[in-house]
Image (cartoon, grey):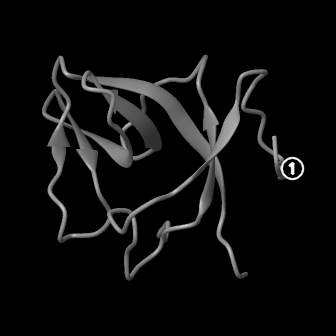
Amino acid sequence: AEEYLASTENAGSHGYWLDVRGPSMTSTTVPSFPEGTKILVQPEGFDLISGKFYVARHRDGETTFKQYLNDAGCGYLMPLNPTFKPLEIDGDWEIIGRVIDAKIPGL
């Protein structure tokens, strides 16, 4: 690790920090995760809960950070920025971790 970030949350022995890239999770309201925000990912032992934030991997290798929403039995990865489209969770997406903490730069 190049940088140590303290957290009161326990991401487990395989937990890791990621940098948010791109504007899809930036919102004019709270919560907002602007580019450069550090997010703490718990990759094991998490439940899938509607309204919480997760990292998902597409079968082509692409990863994304979004809010998970369950609507009438269908799961969606929702961006906070309304100019981006929701992604329906299908067999091409795998949830690989729950985001349990964030550090916004410049505060």
Q: Is residue 26 above or below residue 38?
A: below
Q: Is residue 58 above or below residue 104?
A: above
Q: x, y (%) of residue 62?
A: 32, 35
Q: Classify residue 38 by image quadrant.
A: bottom right
Which element is circle 1 on?
Answer: loop
Q: Which of the two residues, 106 or 77, is positioned nearer the viewer here?
A: 106
> In the rendered picture of this protein, how many numbered marks are placed on residues?
1
Q: Identify the residue at horizontal 45%, vertical 44% (top origin).
A: 52
Q: Identify the residue at horizontal 72%, vertical 22% (top origin).
A: 14
User: Would residue 58 appear left or right of 67 to someone viewing this image?
Assistant: left
Q: x, y (%) of residue 46?
A: 56, 23
Q: x, y (%) of residue 104?
A: 65, 70
Q: Identify the residue at horizontal 14%, vertical 56% (top origin).
A: 85
Q: Amino acid type of disc 1?
A: Tyr
Q: Which residue is mark 1?
A: 4
User: Would residue 81 appear left or right of 45 to someone viewing this image?
Assistant: left
